[in-house]
Amino acid sequence: MESKVSRRLTEKVAEEVCEHIYAPRLARDFRTVFGYMSDLNQAHVLMLARCGLISPQAAKALAAGLLRMEADGPEVVELDPQREDSYFNFEAHLIKLIGTEAGGRMHIARSRNDLTSGIDRLRARDLLLDASQALLSVEEHALDGAFRFREVVMPGYTHLQPAQPISYGFYLAGVAQSLERDHGRLTDAWARTNISPLGAGALAGTTFAIDREAVARSLGFQGLVENALDAVATRDFGLEILSALTQIALGWSRVAQDYHVMVSHEFQTIEFPDRVTGTSSIMPQKKNPVVLEHLKGKAGHLLGLYVASATAVKGTHFTNTIDGNREGMRGVWEAGEETLRCLSLFDLIIATARPNAALMKRRVTEDFASATDLADLMVREADLSFREAHHVVGGVVRAAMDAGLAADGITTGMVDAAAQDQLGRSLGLPADRVRESLDPAASVAARLVPGGPAPDAVAQAVEAAQVRLENRRGVLARKRGDLQGAREELKRAMRELAA
């Protein structure tokens, strides 16, 4: 049997090639890309008709056939791996509907190379919009929590050791700010994704007098990938998106790691409702943070997908290749699916986490997280250099620990004893000032510097961030609206052509 797609090939595709390459690819991709391919084929036919490259009769038949296929959906297309890929199967079904004379003209002035690149960009566009929308939801919940919990004082940690007093709201405001940067990376990728490779052909353009700009407009693209070779050789937009998704995953993994510690029996400073946890098959007392573990594991999965995709691309020639353009992009789609799932879970985690405010307050009161404030007091009121104050407070903390005292047990006598030991003189600081410097709530309230944890500073930061979030939500809505408008105009023009 001869090849079903080429008279150059005198044998049918080997069963092993069908079984291990074409059949799995068709099963995985055809339904997913069908809608994109329909739009792209319609835009191409519309351009061919308007440029006079096909007859009115052929244009009408093609338009009617494509609209019928779109209405029928991908389920009616009989997939045959002997036809290699999605396009040849799509074209074969169209020819079955309207005949070779008209159906065979759809592929004038193009190649599967620029067609596939175009489909990848259409698909990547939707992924960017969906991921951006999901990020906005997580950020919105983080900002909501930042405002509500801005007075819930807790220890801030460095090296997982108590460092300085902050608030749980301040922590969430930091998470929200990180998510805003993640959103910015996706926005940056949009400009390099939403440009059209169509008209590039196999790699050298075409001798037909096509209108590349018209096809781009019909599909909502904002411009062209001008160089025809670059248009088919490049999937750097995919790697850029995958890199941004990986960065998002690293961010949610770090937050999940924090929560994983805070929900532990030893910390117990964060609680999740039972509906977002699991249990043990043998230990009846268990409440397992399964969502947190899933998020951390999936971050590793996404990182692996990025490495795999970049590795697939790095050894390819700068032209159209299967390994670079197929395998390089496969990780993007898998990462996109996992990212959307994980952002939904991350949203759930941020929205449902509840701080144990009383325990947080006790921990930050008893530990020595306010030690820096005591040192600052010495700088302001005892005219010490900060390094001198650092040594004195270190001596105070050591003495308190040796005596089995928490931070709230430190007295002016202990301060003077440490100063005498370090400096050879007492400081004579008022007892109320020492107590106030060691009060974690006072420490947080005093940090009014922009970006600081004071409740008023957090409230101001949240208000500004919410304005920016609404602006980005508006930009997303306009992008979706622009694409929908272009698509509606394409459908109107196709119906007119088919009439």
Image (cartoon, rainbow, N blue to C red):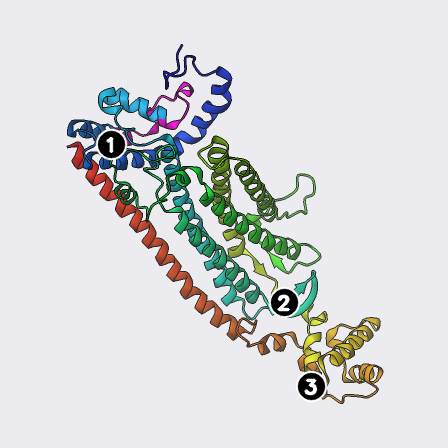
The residue where tag 2 is placed is 154
As for residue 244 lying within the magenta part, the answer is no
SS type, badge 3: helix
> Where 347 falls versus 447 (above or below)?
above
Q: Check disc 3: other Cα within 10 Å, few if <14, some if 14-19, many if 20+.
A: few
Residue 67 shows which numbered tag?
Answer: 1
Q: Check disc 1: other Cα within 10 Å, few if <14, some if 14-19, many if 20+.
A: some
SS type, badge 2: strand
The residue where tag 3 is placed is 432
Mark found first going from the N terminus, 3 or 1 = 1
As for residue 71 lying within the magenta part, the answer is yes
Taking 245 as reference, is 81 left or right? left
SS type, badge 1: helix
Residue 273, visible in the rendered structure: no
> Where 8 falls versus 477 (above or below)?
above
- Majority secondary structure of magenta residues: helix
Mark found first going from the N terminus, 2 or 1 = 1
Residue type indicated by callout 3? Asp
Residue 49 location (% of width, % of height)? 20, 34
Mark found first going from the N terminus, 2 or 3 = 2
Residue type indicated by callout 2? Met
Labels 2 and 3 touching (C-beta < 8 A): no
**Which of labels 2 and 1 is toward the front?**
1
The magenta span reads 66-87
Residue 182, visible in the rendered structure: yes
Q: Quadrant of residue 447?
A: bottom right
Instruction: Name the residue nearer the viewer: 264 or 330.
Output: 330
